[in-house]
Amino acid sequence: MRLPRRVPWAHTSELEQVCAWIFADGDDVESKILAVNRLSAWKAITALPHALESTLAILVVQLQDSPSQSSFAALNLRLAYASTIIRMVNGLVDPLQVGAFARSIASIAAQLGLPSWLVELRHAATHEDLPSLELLREAARESLSWLFHNYFQPTLNPSAPPPPSAALRPITPLLKAYKQLMKAVTRDASLRKRQQGDIDAIIRDIERWIAEAMVSADLVNDAVTWGFNECRESYRGSANLKERAALEPLCDALFDVGALVPLAKKKRHAPMDPFLPTASSKAVWAPLLNKLRSHHPVLPSVFINRAVYSLLGNWLQPDPGTIAIEIEVEDSPRDITYDEYLARWVVWAIQTWEETSDGENQLRKELLLALSPSLVPGKFASPDKTKILTTLLQSVTSGDKELESVADLIFVATKNVSAETWNLSDLAQMDHRLETLSSFDITMEDEGEIDPVSPNVNRTNLPEAQSPGWTLLDVRSGWKSCPIGVYYQKRGVVEDVPM
């Protein structure tokens, strides 16, 4: 949920009026002067969003470039236009420069949908000769158009669909390239020195992909900051959520068959003790995981949560009382060996990262809480899946007496409770119980309740004080309809209500 923020306008109608002054007629100088005056008044009392601040700067330069200001030197106009374009692009891109490694301004601008030639013009105005005045004027008009479609319209009409943004590039090719290099290095140690630069470059590309995913999470949630100081603080405070949103698809890609879990089933076989991945798999993927862990403290929690989600997906057998049709795919890469090998990686992650996690045994406790609901009686778990989950819990809780005691309770419940099935002997027993109950001569008295201790006692002869609060009035009790204003006494005496 986004926190409320302070805005300079009292109502959106004021912002709508400013928008009309700016974009209704591009040649109306008087309207632009009104817009500049209103924006300047807002800027004097509060901080403007970066979009409005950039709009104000561009309008001021355009007014200076009008025929009435012909004395303004062309060089000064070029400098003014260039500075507004540079400040606008930098203000949009810099807040989104997140991650362990810096990203290019062009890549971030592409995710925002900012025209690439504006980024190139910004670079030329900063590091090369100033562009021509005509090109700078066109850049100012293009910037105002982009601000109109990406700021004014979404702000004035929040229900409108957001502008399309660049799609996030897939992470799978980077993981495949990393895997190929690491497999070559592990097979021939002499290649490590030669290939280390390429491996580091791929890891940097993966980090840049994470930064792109964090920006995409902002765009999806409509949480791009526009320069408010309050928003910048909330942006930094919610970085943890953005980081988790970026790491989740990365972990899902790592869990695909062919990454952490080998594609060949024969490579998934490993001894049950220790319940860990093979040495060859750890040699390939452990360096990448540890490097990512050093840059992202929330990776262990995200890694384990996504692994548990993958393990528990489609892990329940259908209810015996329902009819299900199952289609078996020959040589499917996702089978019980996949789940077992993924569980081994969970054990490795906990044993490797538990010392650097927040709190003592925090990762183990999270895993125990995540798996325990799936092992309760009545879940109809398949035996193979149950064996994998119990082995995973045993490996994780080993060495901690408190967690071992909790896990033992789960294991006992799993072993002792079996699915209930009905047969003919159960129906015969139910018939026998029904005949036994029918053999008792139990009758209910009409005029009172039966005492459970003495069923033959007639409660109509007991004193009134022992009667329950509610009594059924019928013809036998002497009741008859009475006018409004009188009430019936139990002994059959009808009295007038004193007025």
Image (cartoon, grey):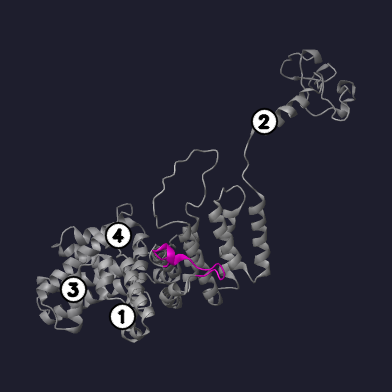
Cα–Cα span, label 2 and label 4: 76 Å
Q: Estimate the x, y position of residue 26 in percent, counting from the top left.
A: 15, 62
- Please report whichever mark, 4 or 1, sits nearer to the chain's N-terminal start: 4
Q: Please say if the residues under marks 2 and 3 sit with CB atoms less than 8 Å apart.
A: no
Cα–Cα span, label 1 and label 3: 47 Å
Nearest the camera: 400 or 446? 400
32 lies above or below 97: above
Q: Estimate the x, y position of residue 160 in percent, counting from the top left.
A: 30, 52
Asked if the magenta segment contains residue 174, the reply would be no
The residue carrying pointer 2 sits among few (fewer than 14), some (14 to 19) or many (20 or more) residues within 10 Å by Cα, namely few
Cα–Cα span, label 2 and label 3: 92 Å
Q: Please say if the residues under marks 2 and 4 sit with CB atoms less than 8 Å apart.
A: no
User: Which residue is labeled 2 in the image?
Assistant: 427
Seen at 35% across and 72% down, the residue is 179
Query: From where the camera sits, is residue 361 visible?
Result: yes
20 lies above or below 66: above
Q: Amino acid at mark 2?
A: Leu
Q: Amino acid at mark 3?
A: Val
- Please report whichever mark, 3 or 4, sits nearer to the chain's N-terminal start: 4
Q: Amino acid at mark 4?
A: Leu
> Which structural element holds mark 3?
helix
User: Which residue is labeled 3 in the image?
Assistant: 61
* Quadrant (top left, top right, bottom left, bottom right) of the C terminus: top right
- Please report whichever mark, 2 or 1, sits nearer to the chain's N-terminal start: 1
Seen at 33% across and 69% down, the residue is 176
> Which structural element holds mark 2?
helix
User: Which residue is labeled 1 in the image?
Assistant: 198
User: Which residue is labeled 4 in the image?
Assistant: 15
